[in-house]
Image: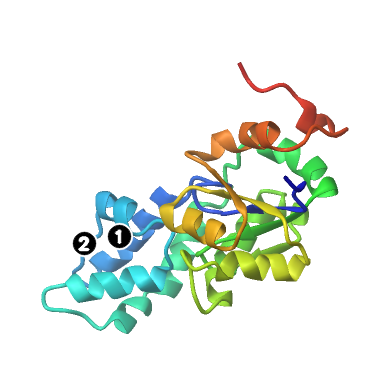
Amino acid sequence: MNRPQAIFFDFDGVLLDTEPVHCACWAEMLQTVGLTLSWEYYRDFCIGIDDRDMLRNMAKMADPPRDWESLWALYPAKKRLFQDRLLVPPFEQDLVAMLPDLHREYRTAVVSSSAASEIEPLLIAGGIREHFDTIVGGEMVKCHKPSPEPYLTAAERLAVTHAIVLEDSAAGIASGRAAGFEVVQVRHPKEVAALLREKLPVTGSRALRQSLPT
């Protein structure tokens, strides 16, 4: 197996446990136009897909059906609400400590269905933006996950052919595999540092050589 040249991170659910916050913000905004978004529906059908696809589906299912673009018009207000609720993003400190060494040895990218304009301020606020070479947001590709385009875009930007992808959603896992990369499934951001230590070759980097938690 070829040594990976890059590590690609999904954002929501991998770097940060933001999905409940996204859901709550969308639910609050959609309620203003008479639509209900439950956590159960969001969890089962919306995680890992582009917000526009989520709204298209909700617009079709509404009674009577809605114009999805009228729902998308709520996005700027949803984005502000989301940023207000995550002024101090709670990144896992074990991963934060690992990122400088990781970035010295591998190219790194955040590849998400969320907009880069939502992701980048959180990386900056968490003090970790400098450890990622690029961000591929949902607004930067024509085809979203589960299409391979997001991960192929990251690979093209960084000029790499071998990468490890960390993903939590079915759509994201399918996207990474379709791009031809090895995918590591993440159940919660708190697992990411340990998964990386387990997966990556042993190197001289102190953070990567630490023992797995017992």
Picture quadrant where residue 129 is located: bottom right
Residue 65 relative to residue 17: left or right: left
Mark on residue 36?
Answer: 2
Which residue ends up furthest to the right in the rendered image?
Answer: 204
Depicted 87 relative to depicted 137: above or below: above
Which residue ends up furthest to the top in the rendered image?
Answer: 214
Picture quadrant where residue 119 is located: bottom right
Looking at the rendered structure, the kind of residue marked 2 is Thr
Screen quadrant of the C terminus: top right
Image point (35%, 54%), residue name: 24
Q: Earlier in the sequence, mark 1 or mark 2?
A: 1
Instruction: Estimate how packed mark 2 is, as few (under 14), some (14 to 19) or many (20 or more) residues with alpha carbons within 10 Å.
Output: some
Mark on residue 68?
Answer: none
**Image spot of residue 191 (x, y percent):** 56, 34
Which residue ends up furthest to the front in the rendered image?
Answer: 1
**Image spot of residue 37 (x, y percent):** 25, 59
**Image spot of residue 121 (x, y percent):** 63, 61
Mark on residue 27?
Answer: 1
Looking at the image, can residue 121 be seen?
Answer: no
- Between residues 121 and 56, which one lies in front from this camera angle? 56
**Image spot of residue 13 (x, y percent):** 49, 47
- Between residues 184 and 67, which one lies in front from this camera angle? 184
Image point (70%, 32%), residue name: 197
- Secondary structure type for disc 2: loop
Residue 34 relative to residue 136: left or right: left
Image point (54%, 46%), residue name: 14
Callouts 1 and 2 close, C-beta under 8 Å? yes
Screen quadrant of the N terminus: top right
Residue 102 relative to residue 71: left or right: right
- Between residues 59 and 185, which one lies in front from this camera angle? 185
